[in-house]
Amino acid sequence: MVRDSGDGPGYGDADDHVSRETGIEGWGVRPTGRAVSQPRPDVGSPEPRTPEPTRGSTVEFHVATPSERPSTGTLYGRGVTPPVDATPAEVRPERRNPPSPRPHPSVVTADTEGAMTDAYVSRETEDPPLAQEAKRAVEILNPSGEVTMPRPPRRRTMCVANQKGGVGKTTTAVNIAVALALHGNRVLVIDLDPQGNASTGLNVPHHSGVPDVYDCLIDGAPLDAVTQQVEGIPNLWAVPATIDLAGAEIELVSVVARESRLKRAIEAGGNAYDYIFIDCPPSLGLLTVNALVAAEEVLIPIQCEYYALEGVQALTNNIELVRSHLNPHLDITTVLLTMYDRRTRLADLVEQDVRNHFGEKCLNAVIPRNVRVSEAPSYSQSVMTYDPGSRGAVSYFEAAQEIALRGAQGAQVGGIA
């Protein structure tokens, strides 16, 4: 018998002290205290119920060995024994881990799981931006030389015209011609602008004394005599324009059949091409009239600004006059929006007006404002070869695809004369 004064064996030593939260078996060592020997009850026999202590009474105490202790491992204080009928939850509250911030699987619904899957996509499944740009560049340059854009069943002669200057006529003619040539089509570009910007963009010599389109208009030279191969693009040829072309309109006044001089030159030697693009000057003079008479289709680039819309009305009136008197096969087949700035509301309004007026003739592709398009001519290149992964190059590539596909579909249904 041991009193509850704390003088009993095994309770005065510091080595025998065990934390209330850990228990003896939590230390992994055997207790060093001198336990009171007491007979162990037989297996299967009910444990004797210890009477509850009263104030001032003597309590019999027994220190259990590790094998006899309950699984909770809690050691109560001096002179107090736990109730026999107490459950482990009543003896010591179970320690719980803090809740995890991640949602429980049972709470995640199917919609939430789909949204999480879409939101959290591994970066390993997506190509980095540089890889995507390189992939687009390879697609545009087409180093294999395969015919990826359909070739028309017969030659298509397109006049790139707009009396408003600075709307992208030359840039459109050069880049669409290069895109078609890179993908298997045989293309000829005729520079009919005395400034010679198309010749500069294609890196074709056009200084004074070089055979140019002036010889075809004034001297009646065949087109093949003034055609030059564009360097670096096997399927592209160009007819340059020199400063001599500036006086051609005055000289053509006294020439017989002055409106059809260019048409005769093309018919004399232009059957080996799939596409012929004529870059017109920003005017409605004799040079532009020659281009309208020689062409069968008109491609109108329209800048997404108000002034460009005013010029289109005058151009369409002239096209109707040429169709009525000189070229009944002439038709406006393609309208391309250029210099589109998505930051401005004006660009959206102009696009809506153009699409409402021209309908399906307006291409789905829109050419945005892009500094690469403006930088390319300073290197005597088109944007397709200068920076094939840029937004400008991709937009012109998409426009060329649409032109080629529409031409192939129109030829099947007899839409192209």
Image: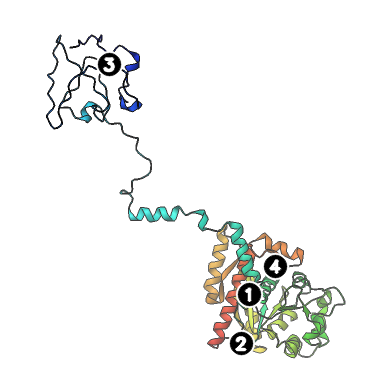
Residue 304 appears anywhere in the view: no
Q: Secondary structure at mark 4?
A: helix
- Closer to the observer: label 3 or label 1? 3
Q: Are marks 3 and 4 in contact (CB under 8 Å)?
A: no
Q: Amino acid at mark 3?
A: Arg
Residue 371 seen in this snapshot: yes
What is the number of the mark on residue 300? 1
Seen at 64% across and 86% down, the residue is: 323
Q: Are marks 3 and 2 in contact (CB under 8 Å)?
A: no
Distance of label 3 from label 2 (alpha carbons) = 109 Å
Disc with the residue nearer the chain's start (3 vs 1): 3
Q: Which residue is mark 2?
A: 153
Q: Determine whether 381 is above or below 40 in the image.
A: below
Image mark count = 4
Q: Residue at x 55, y 84 (%)?
A: 410
Task: Name the residue carrying label 4.
Answer: 385
Relative to the observer, which residue lies in front, 57 or 358? 57
Element assignment for label 2: loop
In the rendered image, which quarter contains the C terminus?
Answer: bottom right
| N-terminal label among 2 and 1 | 2
| Label 3 element class | loop
Question: In the image, residue 253 lies at what x, y percent?
Answer: 80, 85
